[in-house]
Amino acid sequence: MREIIRTETTTQRPAVGPEQQGLLRAQRIAARAHAGQRDKTGRPYTTHCERVANRFSTTEERAVGFLHDTVEKGNGWSASQLREEGFSDMVVEAVSALTRRKDESEHAFLIRIARNPIATRIKIADLEDNINQCDAAGLDASAYSENLEMFCQMIGISPYERKAEETPRPFMRSLLTELGIVRPDQNSGPQASGVRRFLSCLC
């Protein structure tokens, strides 16, 4: 009896680089930390973290976007645990800056955030997303709007000027994606760097 040898073809998955692994790890940690929590619209809280993270292009900013509420509002996470998970000092320090301390006033909290460049950008995105959530849920967004205005004054920019400056970026990125010049998920590499330089010329 002839032995039948079966050969199986395996499809190799594309290798995931260390930067992408770090982002996936940040996303998984955020999902565990905020398990069962909901945002103001009733959706899983992680959708808020994803929206904040997806506004940025650098690995560090996106990681902080996913993790920005992990220590303050998550279940059982600390800055030291994030460091043990392999996140860089830059990421951990930004998350720590975004973590409100016990009995810390809002003003003191925002001043501390303003000392960290990544935390500053994430906080603006966080406040804007909370305002959008309140608007969508029919809730009062005045507290978030006041904090955003106060924070922008602290760092010396106008919210209205900043909104006007940022408006062309998402539109132009979506146009470049539609034309096939850049992939929707492309946030690193030479081509993505060129796109960011091009978009920066618009502002």
Image (cartoon, helix red, strand yellow):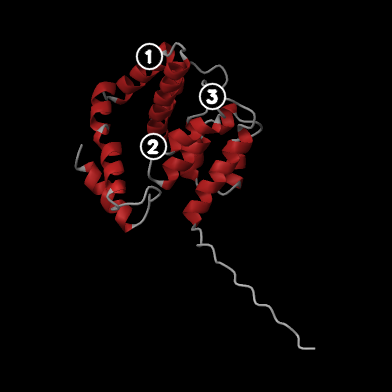
Q: Which residue is mark 3?
A: 39
Picture layout, residue 46 above or below residue 161? below
Which is closer to the viewer, label 1 or label 2? Answer: 2
**Marks 1 and 2: CB-CB under 8 Å?**
no
Give the Cα separation between the discs numbered 1 and 2.
22 Å
Depth order, front residue of 188/133: 133
Picture layout, residue 71 above or below residue 81? above
Where residue 120 appears, x then y in whole percent? Answer: 39, 31
Mark 2: amino acid: Arg
Helix, strand or loop at disc 3?
Answer: loop
Local crowd size for mark 2, using a 10 Å CA cut-off: few (<14), some (14–19), many (≥20): some
Can residue 47 be seen at all in this image of the molecule?
Answer: yes
**Circle nearer the N terminus (1, 2):** 2
Q: Which residue is mark 2?
A: 55
Mark 3: amino acid: Asp
Identity of the residue drawn at 55% across and 66% down: 12
**Marks 3 and 2: CB-CB under 8 Å?**
no
Local crowd size for mark 1, using a 10 Å CA cut-off: few (<14), some (14–19), many (≥20): few
Helix, strand or loop at disc 2?
Answer: loop
